[in-house]
Image (spheres, grey):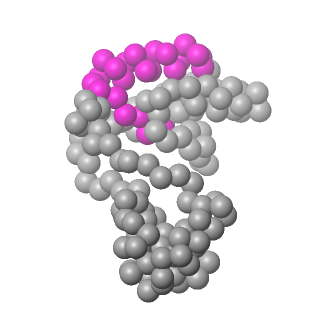
Amino acid sequence: MDAIDRKLLDLLQKNAEMTVQQLSKEVHLSTTPCWKRIKQLKNLGFINKTVSLINRKRVGLNVTAIVFVTINTHDQEKIKIFAETIKDFPEVLECYRMSGEIDYLLKVIVGDIDSYDSFYKRLIEKVPFLKVTSNFAIEEIKFTTELPLDN
C-alpha cells in the first residue's frame, strides 16, 4: 500500500459517496487506474464494506451504555458461549474481550433505560454466569469511524 492508496482510503472513509472521478482528481490519477486501485483495496480486505452512518437519535436510539462484563470462571466453553450469544444482540454495537479485571467491554445502544433493562434481563438469562456493570453516557463528545491513517 502506497501513499495514493492511503489517500484513497482516507477520502473514502470521510465520504464513501465520492465518485471515482472526484477521487481520481484528489489523488492525481485518471479514473481507470483509480477505480482499479479501489477495487484492489476491496479485494485485499482494506475496505470491509461501504455503509451509511445513521443518526441514532433521529431513529430514537438515545441511550449509550458502556457495559463491563466479568465471567465467573474462565473455561473455553463459557468464553465460547458468551461470544456466540452476544452476536445475537443487535443492541451491542461493539464487543471486546479484554485483559485485566474486566473480561468484556460492550457498547450498547438502546432507545431508553427500559430498553436497556430488557437487554440486560435477556443477557443474564442467556448467559447466567456473568457479573455486569453498566455505565451510561451523559454526553457524546467525540464519535468517529475514521481511522487515523497518517500515523
Residue 129 sits inside the magenta stretch: no
Residue farthest to the right?
A: 76
Q: Position of residue 48 (x, y in %)?
A: 57, 54
Relative to 130, is 65 above or below?
A: below
Residue 116 sits inside the magenta stretch: yes
Relative to 112, is 147 above or below?
A: below
Q: Quadrant of the N terminus?
A: bottom right
Q: Residue at x 53, y 18 (%)?
A: 124
Q: Quadrant of residue 148?
A: bottom left
Q: Residue at x 29, y 38 (%)?
A: 56
Q: Nearer the viewer, residue 26 or 20?
A: 20
Q: Position of residue 142 (x, y in %)?
A: 29, 56
Q: Residue at x 60, y 20 (%)?
A: 127
Residue farthest to the bottom?
A: 28
Number of numbered callouts drawn: 0
Relative to 47, is 127 above or below?
A: above
Q: Position of residue 132 (x, y in %)?
A: 49, 28
* Stretch in magenta: 105-128
Q: Nearer the viewer, residue 1 or 86?
A: 1
Can you see residue 41?
no
Q: Residue at x 40, y 60 (%)?
A: 16
